[in-house]
Amino acid sequence: MDLTFSPEEEAFRAEVRAFIAEAKPSLPKALGAPELATRTKDDYLAWHKLLYKKGWVAPIWPKEYGGPGWSVTQRFIFNQESANAEMPTTLPFGLSMVGPVIFTFGNDAQKKKYLPRILSGEDWWCQGYSEPGAGSDLANLRTKAVREGDHYIVNGQKTWTTLAQYADWIFCLVRTDPNVKPQEGITFLLIDMKTPGITVKPIIVLDGAHEVNDVFFDNVKVPVENRVGEENKGWTYAKFLLVHERTGIAGTARSKKAVERLKEIARSEHVDGTPLIETDAFSRKVAELEIELSALEFTELRTLAQEAKGHMAGPESSILKIRGTEIQQRITELTEEAVGYYAFPYERALGANEYPPGPDYAAGAAGRYFNMRKASIYGGSNEIQRNIIAKAVLGL
Amino acid sequence: MDFSFTEEQTLLRNSVARYLADNYKFEDWRKFTRSETGRDPRHWAQFAELGLLAAPLPEAHGGLGGDALSTMIVMEEFGRALVVEPYVPTVVIGGGLIDRAGSDAMKEEFLPRIASGESVMAFAFAEPQGRFNLADLATSAKKSGGNYVLSGQKSVVLGAPWADTLIVTARTSGGQRDAKGVSVFLVDKNAKGVSCRDFPTVDGNRASEITFENVEVPAARLIGAADEGLALIERATDDAIAAHAAEATGAMKMLVDATVEYSKTRKQFGVPIGKFQALQHRMVDMFVNYEQAVSITLMVTLKLADDAERAKAASAAKVQIGRSGRFVGQGAVQVHGGMGMTDELNVGHYFKRLTMLDTLYGNVDHHLKRYAA
């Protein structure tokens, strides 16, 4: 039992820190803003491209496909340093989702075609899983693909598709056999977003952001070579994707940074002349949050230590999703509470050159709170995560 | 970074677990906790035999030189078996205080006797007016020649009916709640002027209300420097908090397992109640609470030696353990239904122990405040 890092790991930390310090000033200003939708496509890609040049953009990929060959601990250190420096995160759709599916289940031609373009950021991917009638019950999906010669003809609708407005490609679960058990008739397709018949419609969420979309498919022709693995075996690949690299989902390093921010705000706000952070009621809430976060941090470390020994994170990682998102939500809630009246101004309704009224730290506080309610819904709702633990861990 | 246990640590855990499974069954526990003495002293002798009492003590004085992790392992297993033996006051607090601040003569006199099981201690720190404040002391100790003269009252001194030696905090100078002026003494329980009113506690332990009336204590029985005892007992209680956190995780583990098992066998509406989602989610939350308790216990145990972080870590642990313990305890009773309410089933007794562990050394409110300070 040992919490210290080896000299090699400390040297690696120093290297990461130096790289971040050099990279940070060159990044677009919008990347410092925590809100997704204030960023352009180029904003998102700026950090991705610097990491790509350095060879660090895909920490979880095997070396042969362009990963850096990091150990679990190195990945942990990289995440920690990125969070401490408040660096943006890279988007998961290509790097953590479809990339691993392709290098695990795809054929050589697919690996050659798609993987390098995911790494370089040339292709922007989005995820076509959810449908209006298939949320938590994902296997109930209806988007239909019918084989016609060398093509599938796809018809249907995907929804909650994050940042599809920028996407070059979408990976989709489609129904290829309606006459079997729902899980057994699903196929995993890669679809070019420029294909005729695809329409993207924005969905505006609670903070006013255009973060997600509806994607409609009207007789969309998809070459059979764009199918990953076998027909009707897509559910297996989909599930692989859902459990791949779950440990990062706790987000403890970023939450710790966000709690620091919250405490700074609570030192600046006053109640009857006393800093908010020194009032009994608020300091208690912050202390509770910090304590829950320290426990989660150790739960994450325990999971990582297991992973480092070669045990894939199992259904226990659902704990990280549940507690991680609950804590992220609590931080945004307390931040919204801390800023008091200056939670009211709706920045998105202001002109582009107008500053929101109130202190800088209040801007976006309410929006982030509203927006973060998504965290306990996405990626398998927290209720679904509890079902997973009940079944797979407790054996109920 | 490594979270695995060494072979030695695993052996230690296995030997404690095996001993308790074979010899400390719930049916036995029910009998001896209700007997006149409240415990079966053979177990203490066996703990000595197994090396548990010597585990964290220094090798120079009959100990095995183990670290806080060995205490954590022992206490987790104790928690699973509801062990009432006064391990924490004797070995963790008494052994720790004497090892850290006692004179050579004191170490020579007491540590080997703790390790061998001959000496049992109780920690007399709480007072009726002081609630959880370790410095709020009305008990006084006045220097008189080669002795201190102790007068005052101590509340709910756990394990005192079994102890031969009391670890007593008293004020040697300053005002009632001053940090400076607190001193710590080893007091012979048979000394003239010590009177005890012994009583059973709700969680199957024994305790005493103790009055000191002009008790003469040799100056050589002062632990550390006069007036400077507060830091010593803060450190000792943080050690105890970590140990009881481990005990609580053991008790929680037992409750989570028992509850899940019960829900698979108990049928209502024609199906095992574990099939109902409302109960599944409640049990999952119990499991998550238990896992978070394990994590925070590791965190505090690994930080005990770090003076800069220790107090905060201990308070964080106390808060998490208090919360998790209540949640798991209440949930276990709820899912067991009427059976959970019975004195007959072990579940309720774990629930009661977890409840008392929340209060011991300060409850959630107290430690949230200490954490935020």
Image (tube, helix red, strand yellow):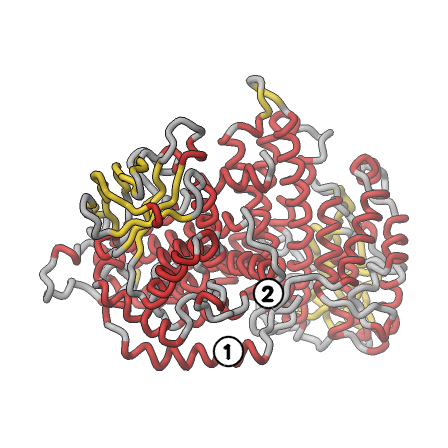
Residue A2 is situated, as x and y percent measured from the top left of the image, at 64, 69
Residue B224 is situated, as x and y percent measured from the top left of the image, at 73, 75
* Chain assignment, label 1: A
Q: Which residue is mark 1?
A: A12
- As displayed, is residue A166 above or below residue A393? below
* Mark 1 neighbour density, 10 Å: few (under 14) some (14–19) many (20 or more): some
SS label for mark 2: loop
Horizontal arrangement in the rendering, residue A297 relative to residue B349 (left or right): left
Where, by quadrant of the figure, is residue B140 drawn?
A: bottom right
- As displayed, is residue A316 above or below residue B31? below
- Between A280 and B261, the one nearer to me in the picture: B261
- How many numbered marks have been drawn onto this rendered protein structure? 2
- Between B260 and A51, the one nearer to me in the picture: A51
Do we see residue B136 in this rendering? no
> Residue drawn 83% across and 64% down?
B54
* Chain assignment, label 2: B
Which residue sits furthest top?
B270
Horizontal arrangement in the rendering, residue B146 relative to residue B127 (left or right): right
Horizontal arrangement in the rendering, residue B325 relative to residue B29 (left or right): left
Q: Which residue is mark 2?
A: B176
Q: Quadrant of the N terminus of chain B?
A: bottom right
Q: Amino acid at mark 2?
A: Gln
- Between A58 and A82, the one nearer to me in the picture: A58
> Residue drawn 87% across and 57% down?
B50
Labels 2, 1: one chain: no
* Mark 2 neighbour density, 10 Å: few (under 14) some (14–19) many (20 or more): some
Residue A100 is situated, as x and y percent measured from the top left of the image, at 44, 56
- As displayed, is residue B317 above or below residue A379? below
